[in-house]
Amino acid sequence: MQKLYPVFYNISSFAKRACLLLPLTFCMKAHAQSDTTKKLKQVDIKATVAPGLQTITPAQQFNAKDIARYSAFNVADAVRNFAGVNIKDYGGIGGLKTVSVRSLGAAHTAVMFDGIQVNDAQAGQIDLSKFNLANVQQITLYNGQPSALLQPARAFASASVLDIRSVKPELTLDKPYKITLGVKGGSFGLVNPTLQWQQRISNNWDAVVNANYINANGCYKYKVDGDRSDTLAIRRNSDVKSVQTDAAIYWAKTDSNKFTARINYYNADRGLPGAVIYYNPQTGQRLENDDIFAQATYQKIWASSLSILVNTKASQLKTHYLDPNFLNAQGKLDQHYKQREFYQSAAVAYQLMDNWQVSYSADVSIAKVDADIYNYAYPSRTTLLNVLASKFTTGNWEFDGNLLQSNIYESVETGTASKGQSVLTPTLMASVSPFGSANFKLRAFYKSVFRMPTLDELYFFAFVPRTIKPESAKQYNLGLTWNKNLSNLLEYIVLNIDAYYNNVSNKIIAIPNQNPVVFSYSNLGKVNIKGIDIGIKTQTQTVNGFTGYLTANYTYQQAQDVTNPSSSSYLNQIPYTPKHTVAANTGISYNKLGLYYNYILSSDRYYTVNNQPEYLVPGYSISDVSATYTFKLNRLPVQAAAEINNLYNKNYAVVRSFPMPGRSYRLSIQISI
């Protein structure tokens, strides 16, 4: 069973921050005969820096202002605009949404929230729709890994890292609090109020509290396929009701001595609409989540070039799955799961020389799953990760490398446990500025990745462990990054081009069945993935109040089964991997008004390894438009927005037999006190 519980934890790298103060002293000549004071006109100096990330591995980033232009309702809606990303979307307001990067699968993407990974040992995939977008300040996608050395070992262990950063307190000296109230409403009965309260407690302590509520009936129309008519049906059992609360405290003595603690609670009840099979789209399956976690982070940097980072986390995820129409002796399938995890991490970094830094990170996690299923294995997994890393620069060159040791041990209460694993995986990275300018860099990396099968892949609906082998991947990347601040029509331009090759052995394929929670699993053998990501971002100078924006990403991917030359699937594209994807966003702002257009294109995919016409999932292109307006109400800032999603009312599916909504509308308003 593919359990997508909302495990809200995350992990990410901590970057060094520096602040350079340039005191300017102006001396004026005094005249003894007349003491005259002249008031000079204030001159505002504005300098815009190109927003490209000059990292040794490919990285893409959106901030809160970018996200507002993407007609995004959740994190998945924003992430789909990154290059190399494939979102599996099961439709609807509460539909499950997972992310795969460069065709490696969702389990190879580490989702991190404020420096700590959102982990799910049972399912291995994170549902991005469950993050409160009102509490997201920045989203960064790293291919390979983040470039910082001082980070948890888990950040080194995945093929890619999706780093989500929450909103931090932004309080002024004369106002120790900030309250933001918002509400969204729209098609399919959507009501989504949000609250954020930022509060200064003392000179060193701040707090932020968030609350998010979603209620929607999820009933939308879709075109029935296969009957050669224009018959419209209504998607049923797609309702969702969720509430999320989050409280965080921040302590900082200095910028090099910081502590953060957070507690997060999430509860959701949703219908699982199931696959539309001919004229039997009805289903009564339900999924309930009741999750809580607490996490804390401490970071200290000494003048001696020594720095430490300590993370700790405890979580509990409860899931209730109900299928009232299941054909068994009880006449239903009623299952309860409870997953508990304790996680501890420590990292230390030291600057040996001005151009040489080393680090060591160690993580330990203990996860256990309980369920009220007959003959269930009740598995426990202990994971130990150790990483040695180094960063060395000389001239225009930078060299990074690390060696990760993964030790995984399992035990069960019923049956036989899967065999433990101990694996070493290296990573090598290099970049050079060939013309001496940091604006242009060539970069390359090699990374070996090991993925243990999830507990569901091994034990769910299995009286003995499935013979699912661990998955290993070797990543190769060669690319360039260039950005330039301009002074003509364009304010800046950012260009990224990366070609990559991934060689995967024992690739684990998960194919959804009649509902998005129960999957079938198998090892495909060997897969070769070749691709190229191209991204460009630019912004015009502000002229007479007008500013233009453009972001565009293109991805080509060839992900082929190369297991057996005599097999009918040899050199076929693996399931749910489009060869071409395009994401583009453009818009214009005029003073307080903004108009934006977002475009997503995905080419055809196949839902099995047999690339025959009957297994084709047609491609699609979707257009969204939005308008934003900011104003003041009794001196309080107000932001209003109107959106039309799927502007041309396209009938399409991301996952076979899970139709997506047609044209829909959303209105939102937000006021800060």
Image (cartoon, rainbow, N blue to C red):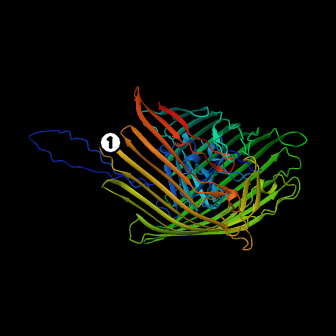
Observer able to see residue 392: no
Residue type at mark 1?
Gly
Please tell me whether residue 496 is drawn above or below residue 598 in the rendered image: below
Where disc 1 sits, the SS reads loop
Q: Quadrant of residue 611?
A: bottom right
In the image as oriented, which residue stretches furthest toward the top? 634
Residue visible at 8% across and 40% down in the picture: 33
For the question of whether residue 350 can be seen, the reply is: yes
- Find residue 451 and report its horizontal and vertical position in percent: 70, 62
Residue 588 image point, x, y percent: 39, 44
User: On the picture, is 155 further left or further right than 47?
Assistant: right
Q: Circle 1 is placed at which residue position? A: 545
Depth order, front residue of 609/181: 609
**Extreme left residue here?**
33
Count of numbered tags: 1
The crowd level at tag 1 (other Cα within 10 Å; few <14, some 14-19, many 20+) is few
Direction from residue 72 to residue 119 in the image, left or right: right
Outermost bottom residue: 565
Q: In front here: 497 or 44?
A: 497
Extreme residue in the front direction: 228
Residue 288 in percent (x, y) is at 73, 39
Q: Position of residue 595 (x, y in %)?
A: 42, 41
